[in-house]
Image (tube, helix red, strand yellow):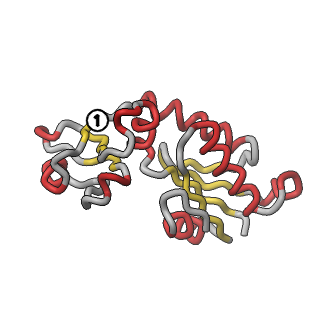
Amino acid sequence: MHILHIDMDAFFASAEQRDNPALRDRPVAVSGRPESRGVVATASYEARRYGVKSAMLMASAIKLCPDLMILPVNHNKYRKVFESIMGIFRSYTPLIEPISLDEAFLDVRGSEKLFGPAEVIGMAIQKRIKEELQLSASVGIGPNKFIAKLASDYQKPNGFT
């Protein structure tokens, strides 16, 4: 087992909640404007409890959660945060395949002699993301990308499988 899949939990919404304490513990959606047929880019876990999901039409999300806080997408912020996350990844392996601004595959086969088995590397990365960036990530480990991706989805948020 040498492949890690690291998926940031509700990344855009979590970054907004981290940076604005008034949004913490509140249902948040990052999206386009609701009147322009926008869709939810990311929903916080508080919003997900109401059934709000990514790719859902904003009109539907607002019906499910009338108190939903709707924030515009801030690509510059998310890109900067992901650059910091990539810096953490690079400190363990150069073999990184970003999938989007909130997830990546890491091949740690050549890193295990330096840092320990994949499980130790995955836990260290998850801990550093939490401590250094105050964000939550789910980590999946497997013999290939498919299994690692399934594993990271298994116990979200902040899962480790």
- Camera-side residue: 90 or 125? 125
Q: Which residue is at the far right?
A: 113
Image location of residue 31, percent across then percent down: 27, 41
- Looking at the image, which residue is at 78% across and 60% down? 109
Q: How far from the left and from the top, in percent, is residue 121?
A: 74, 55
Q: In the rendered view, tell whether residue 31 sits above or below residue 5.
A: above
Q: Residue 32, how many percent across, how many down? A: 23, 38
* Quarter assignment of residue 51: bottom left
Q: Is residue 122 left or right of residue 158?
A: right
Q: Residue at x 33, y 49 (%)?
A: 43
**Label 1 secondary element:** strand
Task: Report the quarter where the N terminus lies.
Answer: bottom right
Amino acid type of disc 1?
Leu
In what quadrant of the picture does the C terminus appear?
A: bottom right
Q: Residue at x 81, y 54 (%)?
A: 111
- Between 10 and 25, the residue placed more toward the observer is 25
Image location of residue 93, percent across then percent down? 74, 48
Quadrant of res 71: top left
Residue 44 as seen in the image, left or right of residue 95: left
Residue beneath label 1, please?
71
